[in-house]
Image: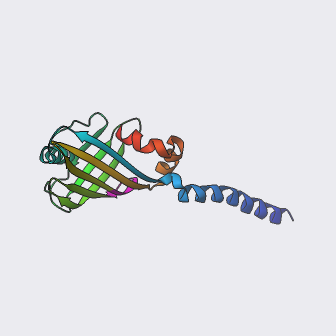
Amino acid sequence: MKNKFKKTAIFMLVLILIIPFSLILKSEFTTYDVTDEAIINASPEVVFKALRDEFIGKTNWWMPYLSSKIRDGHSPGRIGSLIDVTVHGEHPVKITSKSVEIKENEMIRSENVEGPLKGETVWTLERVNDKTKLSCRWRMKASGLVFKFRTLDLGKENIYYAAVK
């Protein structure tokens, strides 16, 4: 009888731990779809070059919050190039992004292929009079258990801003 009770208690404990754990793994808190937009007082050509220079590590105007560098052996502006990105902060996050589509002075689309956020980022540039409307759509899904728990701690709205502020 004692042995049966022990097995039942262990089974109940496992259920108590697994159910919340599985809910976290499937939680909407682990999926993001955020768009930021800005009007920049420069042409799309100038803004595109500035973005490309930042992505490959030639400039660093997003520091101290974010840095990126093209991986050795890859060429800037080419589809398939790998960019290593680090989001600096209390808990730095490292991501590798792969360029999958580039339209000179119009759009850059990349996919995260390594790191705790999987998904895509699309930068679009639109000429508005003498300026550029720059949009960044960030569609990600948290991967990795630790990052999912951090996501719950920060809240869905704040994880993106914690990464890019």
Q: Nearer the viewer, residue 157 or 27?
A: 157
Residue 16 lies, in percent from the top left, at 69, 56
**Residue furthest toward the right?**
1
Residue drawn at (31%, 44%) of the image: 37
In which quadrant of the rendered view does residue 47 lie?
A: top left
Residue 118 lies in the magenta-colored region: yes
Horizontally, residue 98 falls left or right of residue 18, namely: left
In which quadrant of the rendered view does residue 17 lie?
A: bottom right
Horizontally, residue 20 falls left or right of residue 165, namely: right
Magenta range is 112-120
Examine the residues drawn in magenta and state their main secondary structure: strand
- Above or below, 50 against 8 in this view is above
Image quadrant in which the C terminus is located: top left
Image quadrant in which the N terminus is located: bottom right
Residue drawn at (72%, 63%) of the image: 11
Residue 112 lies, in percent from the top left, at 32, 57
Residue drawn at (40%, 55%) of the image: 140
Residue drawn at (22%, 39%) of the image: 40
Q: Nearer the viewer, residue 141 or 130?
A: 130
Residue 57 lies, in percent from the top left, at 18, 44
